[in-house]
Amino acid sequence: MLGAPGAGKGTQCKRLVARYGIAHLSSGDILRKERAQGSELGRKAQAYMDRGALVPDELIIDMMKKAIDQAPEAGFVLDGFPRTLKQASALDQVLDVAGVRLDAVFNLEVDDAIIEDRMSGRRSCPTCGAVYHIRNLKPKREGFCDHDGTALVLRPDDELEVVRQRLVAYHQQTRPLIDYYKGRGILYQIDANDGVDVVDIQLQKIIDSLAKAGKGAVDQADGKAVV
Ligand code: ADP
Ligand code: AMP
């Protein structure tokens, strides 16, 4: 799942996981867990994350290789990885060795003004990682997680200054991946400015037609989201 920070990748991935019974491999979530545990990887990643920079490729590639190797047979959705061309090419190698095919790459396109609103309004649960929004996706009890009652927080890297740096990193280092996957014929452009349900339905339609075709190719004549 590609998209700017705050585009809604995590939100949509959680829905895919619930619907299709696949694993959610989120590099950001794994890094936050490593940090909370005080591991060596977590300590190394900390300074980069806090200033809105990307964590070095070598650390991320090792970490995601382990996650992919442990993923269940049912498959997985990658969220936040790859984020650089080097990571994308490392991913190709990892998948090759594992004998796994990348069926589809979704690019969630969201206008800048909407991105700002989504990031400034995002509230996260430090215990279970659930994500809410102060207007768009409110918890049942304001300020507290629906699942475990923990007080919700604004992620430190969702502060305005850090958000700006994360968007710079996204434009410089991650956007080139769109052309990388376009060239491979597996990129689906998704207009993700709409509400969560509308975006979800777009993804669902594509995935279901991929499944129907029994492989990584939808009916191109359908022309809806295929690039
Ligand atoms: P990402 O994983 O791409 O960084 P998130 O899934 O955490 O983004 O979403 C960022 C914020 O925007 C969250 O607060 C989430 O609740 C909200 N959000 C996600 N998708 C939508 C949507 N389609 N419409 C409105 N708000 C959304
Ligand atoms: P996210 O939760 O996806 O928004 O990621 C939070 C932060 O973790 C990013 O701003 C980066 O510092 C770091 N990070 C997550 N995934 C990657 C990745 N694939 N490559 C480099 N850094 C990453």
Image (tube, helix red, strand yellow):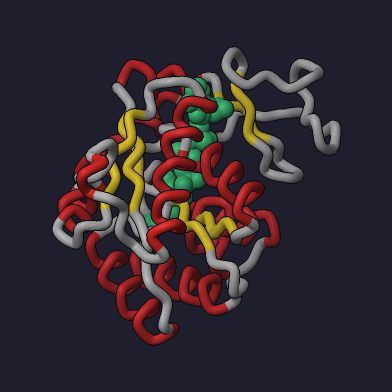
Residue furthest right in the image: 149
Nearer to me, 117 or 21: 21
- What's the residue at 30%, 59% (across, down)? 217
**26 relative to 59, above or below:** above
Q: Which of the 4 quarters of the picture holds residue 90?
A: bottom left
Residue furthest bottom in the image: 97
Q: Let me know if residue 157 appears in the view.
A: no
- What's the residue at 51%, 51% (across, down)? 28
- Say whether residue 149 is left or right of residue 81: right
**56 relative to 227, above or below:** below
Q: Let me know if residue 115 appears in the view.
A: yes
- Say whether residue 197 is left or right of residue 167: right
Residue 15, position in %: x, y? 59, 42
Nearer to me, 175 or 50: 175
Q: Which of the 4 quarters of the picture holds residue 39?
A: bottom right
Residue 117, position in %: x, y? 44, 17
**108 relative to 194, above or below:** below
- What's the residue at 27%, 36% (across, down)? 224
Q: Give the total number of marks visible in the rendering.
A: 0
Instruction: Name the quadrant of the C terminus.
Output: top left
- What's the residue at 49%, 57% (across, down)? 77
Nearer to me, 107 or 214: 214
Residue 221, position in %: x, y? 20, 44
**90 relative to 113, above or below:** below
- Say whether residue 125 is left or right of residue 6: right
Residue 204, position in %: x, y? 48, 42
